[in-house]
Every structure is written in structure tokens, then in C-alpha cells.
Image: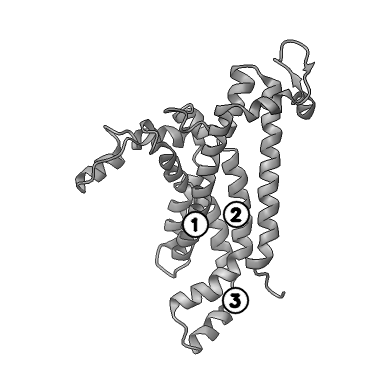
Amino acid sequence: MSLFYSFTDYDIIQKPTWVGFKNFTELMHDELFWKSLYNTFYYTLFSCPLGVVVGVGIALLLNLKVKGMAIYRTIFYLPSIVPFVASSILWLWLLDPQFGVINALLENLGIPGPGWLVDPQWSKPALILMGLWGVGGPMIIYLAALQDIPNDLYESADIDGATWWQKILFITIPMLTPVILFNLIMGLIGSFQYFTQAYIMTRGGPNDSTLFYALYLYNNAFSYFHMGYASAMAWILFAIVMSVTLLIFKSSARWVYYGGE
């Protein structure tokens, strides 16, 4: 039905009127459409690689044989199960430019804190920083994959005189690549649908700097009642996500290692 509605003028109340490709044509000339697409790609381009790096890094630390490690693992995992609404309200307080904890800590270090969510240049980096707080979900998957790597590989590397960095680079990372591929694809799909935090914290501001694609789609559908226009946006989003996912799958043959192959 959404595909049908994408070719109609539909406001939910009245019957849909067939308009052909008019919605898609108007989208190509809609500045906010391109702005929301840019914001979404910006967020995806930085948040996904950072999420992988931070997730793997924390998993490596939590895989060490240290007393009380179960407590540390629980602490790092807890933020990922906090509801988005609660975490958004918490981060509104943390990122407050005048009374926020982060700027207070920066001030103690002699660094002037940025405006974060009220500054168009810092609003997207602020949301990316907030996203790293919930990296516990992927981290658990990385941790499980780390514990599945055979110790024989590390023992052989020790005999050959490999350093800790060489073991990470030539054993750990290659053995983690299937899990990295999975988390990367899930992260990409999630980032292209980024909505809740932006809706609660900024409503797309300031200056549309956090008007992400899913938020603009929602506004068109349920604020402006341009349901046909929003349906067209949804199918364009589907095409983008599908294309990027297929591209990553196609490239995975060059960098993903599967044991036994």
C-alpha cells in the first residue's frame, strides 16, 4: 500500500488521488529533502565506523583476565538497555551548554565548552557522541566472538615472537570480521532510520542541522499529512539502504574471513 500511496496525493482523510511520479519529482527539488539526506549520511558516515572501533576496543579490554570483570561488563552493557526516551532526557542534561556536566568538566580543564545541541556545527557531533554511549549491544557480540577465537592461534604467535599489536592485527581482527560485518550492516540500517533521539532532543533544530531523513519523513506523514509524499520518501530510503547493504556485502569478500575457507 505504501508503494501505491507513493504515486498518489493522500492526506489520510480523503481518498488518494493518483499523481504518478509527481511526489518523486517534487522530492528532487525539495531543499529539506536533500538537507535531511545530508544529515543522515553525515551521521552514518561517522557513527558507524566509530561504533565499530569503540565496540571492538571495549570488547578487547573486557576480554582481559582481571578480577571483577563481570561487574565491568555489566556496567558497559547497561546503557544499551536504557530506553531511548530516558537516555535522551539524560543527555539533554549532560549536553546543556550552561549547566551540563560535560561542559563543566571541559571548563575545569581550561577548555571552553561548545554549544552542543544549540549550535548547528556541534549538534550532529553531539548526537554521534551520545550514540557511542550505547555501544554495549554490539560490544557483547564482539566479546562473544573474541572468546570463540582458538587459543592455539595466540600460542603459535607467541612462539613466533609476535607482539600484542601483531596478534590483534593478524589474528583477532581477521577472526572478528564476520561479526564486524554483521554489526556494521545493523548499524547502517539503524543510522539511516535515526529518529527517536532527534525527535525528543532537537525536533530537527537548530537550523535543520539535526533534521534526519526519518524525522522529515515523519513530519510529512503525521504533521503535514502528506502521506503520499512520505511514502515516496520511504521507498527512496528503502532503495538507499538496500543499495548500501548490497555494496557492503559485495565488498565483504575482500575483507571478511571465515574460518575453514
Left or right of 142: which side holds 125?
Answer: left
Label 3 neighbourhood size at 10 Å, few (<14), some (14-19), many (20+)?
A: few
- Label pair 3/1, CB-CB below 8 angstroms: no
Badge 3 or badge 1: first in the primary sequence: 1
> Which circle marks residue 150 in the picture?
3
Badge 3 or badge 2: first in the primary sequence: 3
Image quadrant for the C terminus?
bottom right
- Quadrant in which residue 16 is drawn: top right
Label 3 to label 2: alpha-carbon separation: 22 Å
- Label pair 1/2, CB-CB below 8 angstroms: yes
Q: Amino acid at mark 3?
A: Pro
Residue highlighted by disc 2: 183
| Residue 141 sits above or below residue 258 on the image | above
Q: Residue at x 70, y 45 (%)?
A: 242
Badge 1 or badge 2: first in the primary sequence: 1
Q: Residue at x 70, y 39 (%)?
A: 238
Q: Residue at x 64, y 30 (%)?
A: 28
> Which circle marks residue 55 in the picture?
1
Q: Amino acid at mark 1?
A: Gly
- Quadrant in which residue 149 is drawn: bottom right
